[in-house]
Image (cartoon, grey):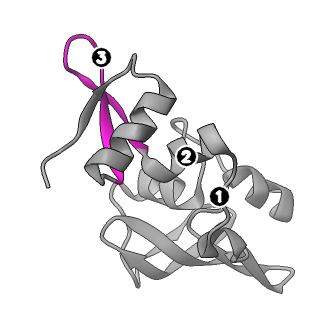
Amino acid sequence: STPFYVPETTEARALLQRFEDEKEVFAFIVDEYGSINGIVTHEDLAEEVIGEIADRRDLEPLYHKISDRVIIANGAIELDQLEEIFEIPFPRKSTVVTLGGWLTEQMGDIPQTGASYENEYFHFHILAADPHRVNKVYIGVK
């Protein structure tokens, strides 16, 4: 399908109707100059208008504690939560929020299954990833 573009001034309910009419799952948001300012998904928009939608992914735990020094984490876990778990900071160069985004920032590309990364506090090993995101990560305290 061709990309679906909407002006940033489009009201949420009108956009939700366009998603339904055009059977699209995401749209590019453009400003008055035609520059892309972001992406909105049908699910995100529906949750804003209707309220939270529980799906299978939301029910999966974001991490499994293996020991005091090791967890297996979902790439979508927020850095703030990891900082609480380990009481160790995750320094950021930008506004990244998730572990997957942070590892991508640190490594310079989306890490693939089998990749490893270390910093002064942790050893990370990518257990599962697809071309677009990090799914599962082993995190061990050094």
Q: Judge left or right: residue 81 versus residue 3.
A: right
Start-end of magenta stretch = 25-40
Q: Quick one: which residue is furthest to the bottom in this view?
A: 66
Dominant secondary structure of the residues highlighted in magenta in the image: strand
Considering depth in this image, is 56 or 141 the residue closer to the camera? 56
Mark positioned earlier in the residue sequence (2 or 1): 2
Q: Residues within 10 Å of mark 3 (few under 14, many from 20)?
A: few
Task: Name which residue type carries label 3.
Answer: Asp
Q: Residues within 10 Å of mark 2 (few under 14, many from 20)?
A: some
Query: Which residue is depicted at the point 46% across and 23% down?
Result: 11
Q: Is residue 104 shown above or below 55? A: above
Answer whether residue 142 is visible to the viewer in this image. no
Residue 17 location in percent, x, y? Answer: 41, 39
CB within 8 Å, label 3 to label 2: no
Considering depth in this image, is 140 or 73 the residue closer to the camera? 73
Mark positioned earlier in the residue sequence (3 or 2): 3
SS for dot 1: loop
Residue 9 location in percent, x, y? Answer: 40, 16
Q: Disc 2 marks which residue?
A: 46
Residue 20 location in percent, x, y? Answer: 37, 48
Q: Disc 3 marks which residue?
A: 31
Q: What whole-number distance in Å separates the C-alpha atoms at marks 2 and 1?
A: 8 Å
Residue 83 location in percent, x, y? Answer: 78, 55
SS for dot 3: loop
Query: Which residue is depicted at the point 55% across and 46% down?
Result: 46
Task: Name which residue type carries label 2.
Answer: Ala
Q: Looking at the rendered structure, which numbered label has been put on residue 53?
A: 1
Q: Is residue 1 shown above or below 55? A: above
Q: Judge left or right: residue 111 versus residue 95.
A: left
Query: Which residue is depicted at the point 73% across and 80% down?
Result: 71
Quadrant for the N terminus in the image: bottom left
